[in-house]
Amino acid sequence: MSDKKKEKSKEVISFIICLIVLLCIGYFTGFLEGFAPSDFYNAYRKLTANLDSKANSSKDKINLFETNRDKKAVQKYGGYQPNIIPEAVIRGYKASNIWTNIFASSTKVVFYTYSNSENDIKFNDTVFEYLTSREMVDEYILQAYTEKSFSNAALGTPGPSKICNSFEECNAVRQKASDYSLLSEFLKRCGQTMCVINNDKREYIRLRTKNSQDATSMLQSLKGW
């Protein structure tokens, strides 16, 4: 099996696990009443298309979500191509009231997850040391999670809800569930490498590969972003 097929299989398995967790939450809370499975699938498909765009290539095309605040082209900064944070992600964090440490920060946020592997630990140590240096300490806020702590935090709660009694209420519940799913998937995908999130601009830049040298180079280039 090729590396591309293996990666696709991992994404599908991760998505199915995420979906099962959300359905379990919905079953016991009534949150997903009136929810259609296609909502999760469409949200996932749109998100992966956006996050898989190559941030460093001059030939890149910016895949914007239908829910973006506008369709304008986002200018490159320091050789990196920002993407607009999907409006559904913003709605999802506001409705669930979790991940405020990432999406409510006025300082640029560096977010990623890491495992117990030697490479991941080296990556985390390098980025932590770099961001706590005198030059960078005021430029970024580091939000790094172990895979276990992220998994526990990501379960969170989509917030209290009631069984819908009208078409409008059911649509609202369905939208809320879809937004929450998209928020979770956005963070999971960012966590696989690293994302720099600029809430003032409502934009983010994703590191293409989880390499400590590439990470520090990107952070230096985005210092004034």
Image: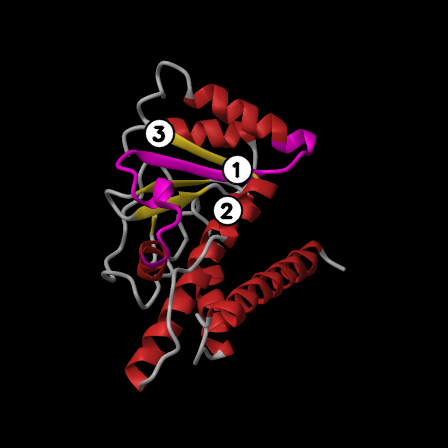
Which circle marks residue 22 in the picture?
none
Name above or below for residue 154 compared with residue 124: below
What distance separates the C-alpha of mark 2 from that of mark 3? 22 Å
Q: Nearer the viewer, mark 1 or mark 2?
A: 2
Residue on which disc 3 sits: 140
Mark 2 and mark 3 residues within 8 Å of each other at the beta carbon = no
Q: Magenta span covers which residues? A: 95-120
Residue on which disc 1 sits: 145
Mark 3 and mark 1 residues within 8 Å of each other at the beta carbon = no
Mark 1 and mark 2 residues within 8 Å of each other at the beta carbon = yes
For the point 54% across and 44% down, which residue is it? 150
Residue 6 image offset from top left, x and y in percent: 70, 57
Residue on which disc 2 sits: 153
Residue 111 highlighted magenta (yes or no): yes
The kind of residue on which mark 2 rests is Ala
Residue 43 image offset from top left, x and y in percent: 44, 68
Residue 200 image offset from top left, x and y in percent: 24, 42
